[in-house]
Amino acid sequence: MLSVRGLTKTYGGTAVVRGLDLDVRHGECFGLLGPNGAGKTTTLRLLLGLIEPDAGSIELAGLPVPQRAREARGKVGVVPQLDNLDPDFTVRENLIAYGRYFGLSKAAIVARVPALLDFAGLASKADAPIAQLSGGMKRRLTLARALVNDPDILFLDEPTTGLDPQARHLIWQGLRRLINAGKTIVLTTHFMDEAERLADRLVILDHGAIVAEGAPRALIESNIEPAVVEVFGEGLPEWMDRHATSICQRFERVGETLFCYTSDADCVIDALDQARGLRYVHRPSNLEDVFLKLTGRDLRD
Ligand code: ADP
């Protein structure tokens, strides 16, 4: 569905996308992760033919981009980072107006609207103005709107940013339904749990280049010890000096918390049980641990 070779984009002498190679197969959910400034948005814009690359080639839904980007975009659905629904229209009118951009006949769109409303869980809100929708409803409508042209591939830019847990779960449910129905999805997200849950494969970008690539579980298994004990509380520096090097394979101090990465969490917990004033959280390692190991813990802006 998507094949990218040597994709490069430079702004003001700085390469913000540096020789990217990507392949997204039909029916797969592909994650594009990276800290702020890694080049995710620029990459998405290049893939959609909204900006021109300095080098490299893109084939999207079988068409070369940017040469035939307009045609390719007809086979694509896009959920932008910020909802850009038309506030002057109702829910139903938003779907119809968007379908018209794709040159669909009004009759064809009207026929699709009930299924789209149903997918978004908004059948009872069809005639409501946008201002009456919650944040989660707006997101679901934006997602349904992206399906108006029955796209082969969907690009989702941070689809659940700003939503509460209930609303996120509803969006994930919708995305799962699309994946099960054979749609191809390219997803950018800051939420590692979202990527772990949805993506079949993903890349982690940093400074415009890929630093890791694979299935979430495989990335965790190959990059990180299986368990993490996060230790915090009174007496941490002393405990760390006495125990950390001898009982965990790798540790990292971040502010007031010590992250102990280990394949033997019991051993760490035994040592902690004897320490007064320290508390801990024991959990399996996850994609966020991989992400932070590979891209660092420094703040990006
Ligand atoms: P991300 O989406 O991963 O946060 P972006 O693709 O938005 O990253 O940005 C990557 C880098 O490119 C950043 O350093 C950003 O400042 C720079 N950049 C993005 N768009 C432009 C532009 N139009 N002009 C100049 N620099 C840009």
Image (cartoon, grey):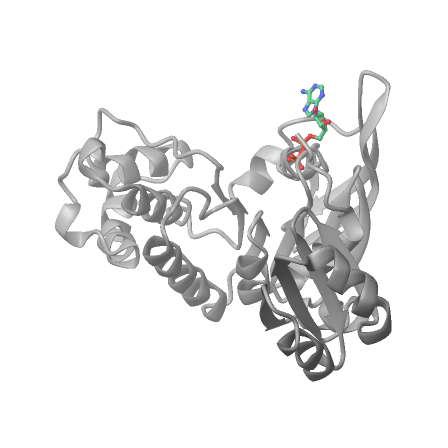
User: At 74% from the left edge and 53% from the top edge, which residue is drawn?
Assistant: 253
Indicate the position of residue 300 as horizontal and vertical percent values. 69, 34
Do we see residue 220 in this rendering?
A: yes
**Relative to 43, is 277 on the left or the right?**
left
**Relative to 13, is 64 on the left or the right?**
left
Q: Quadrant of the C terminus?
A: top right
Using the image as rendered, state which of residue 260 and residue 33 is in the foreground.
260
Using the image as rendered, state which of residue 41 and residue 221 is in the foreground.
221
Indicate the position of residue 267 as horizontal and vertical percent values. 73, 82
User: At 35% from the left edge and 39% from the top edge, which residue is drawn?
Assistant: 99
Using the image as rendered, state which of residue 54 and residue 149 is in the foreground.
54
User: At 39% from the left edge and 48% from the top edge, which residue is drawn?
Assistant: 143
Q: Quadrant of the N terminus?
A: bottom right
Indicate the position of residue 176 as horizontal and vertical percent values. 45, 66
Q: Quadrant of ligand 1?
A: top right
Is the residue 40 above or below the residue 199 in the image? above
Do we see residue 23 in this rendering?
A: no
User: At 44% from the left edge and 63% from the top edge, which residue is drawn?
Assistant: 178
Using the image as rendered, state which of residue 14 and residue 89 is in the foreground.
14
Indicate the position of residue 148 as horizontal and vertical percent values. 37, 46
